[in-house]
Image (spheres, helix red, strand yellow):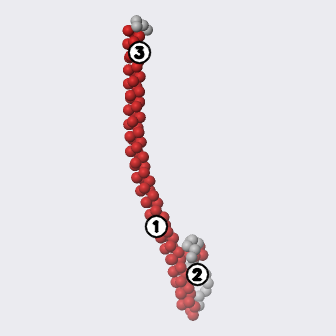
């Protein structure tokens, strides 16, 4: 059964036609059957939407866990990168001081 919602599927009563006293029961039965069919289509669509939302929520939870793990890794990476930068600055400063000391030891006063 096609569960797409269409205007025709949702139309359960056409109030434009004249209903005689003898045909009221048949028209009510027809309207009830059409309403039941419309309700089934709506229920199927709602259940499908619920399943899709649940799947999206599950995926969002998994994605959140992955993003948290990535954030922890990035934080560790940043700390390591900051350590390396500091070490590089300290080493550069030490090299400059050693170079100056060697030049002074050789008598170069520039």
Give neighbour class at mark 2: few <14, some 14-19, many 20+ (Cα, 10 Å).
Answer: few
In which quadrant of the rendered image does the N terminus lie?
bottom right
Marked residue nearer the N-terminal end (1 or 3)? 1
Please tell me whether residue 4 is drawn above or below residue 78 in the rendered image: below
Give neighbour class at mark 1: few <14, some 14-19, many 20+ (Cα, 10 Å).
Answer: few
Measure the alpha-carbon separation of dots 2 and 1: 33 Å
Residue, disc 3: 99
The residue sitting at 54% across, 90% down in the picture is: 25
Picture coordinates of residue 85, whole percent (x, y): 41, 30
| Residue 50 marker | 1
The mark closer to the camera, 3 or 2, is 3
Marked residue nearer the N-terminal end (3 or 2)? 2
The image quarter containing residue 62 is bottom left
The residue sitting at 38% across, 9% down in the picture is: 105
In the image shown, does 57 or 20 lie closer to the viewer? 57
The residue sitting at 39% across, 24% down in the picture is: 91
Question: How many dots with numbers?
Answer: 3
| Residue 15 marker | 2
The mark closer to the camera, 2 or 1, is 1
Question: Disc 1 on helix, strand or loop?
Answer: helix
Give neighbour class at mark 3: few <14, some 14-19, many 20+ (Cα, 10 Å).
Answer: few
Please tell me whether residue 101 is drawn above or below residue 62 in the rendered image: above
The residue sitting at 41% across, 39% down in the picture is: 77
In which quadrant of the rendered image does the C terminus lie?
top left
């Amino acid at each position: 059964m096609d569960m797409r919602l269409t205007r025709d599927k949702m139309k359960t009563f056409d109030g434009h036609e004249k209903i005689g006293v003898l045909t009221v029961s048949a028209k009510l039965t027809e309207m009830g059957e059409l309403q039941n069919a419309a309700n089934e289509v709506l229920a199927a669509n709602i259940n499908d939407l619920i399943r899709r939302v649940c799947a999206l929520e599950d995926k969002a939870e998994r994605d959140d866990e992955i993003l948290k793990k990535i954030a922890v890794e990035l934080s560790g990476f940043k700390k390591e990168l900051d350590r390396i930068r500091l070490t590089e600055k300290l080493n550069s400063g030490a090299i400059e001081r050693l170079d100056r000391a060697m030049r002074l030891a050789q008598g170069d006063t520039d």
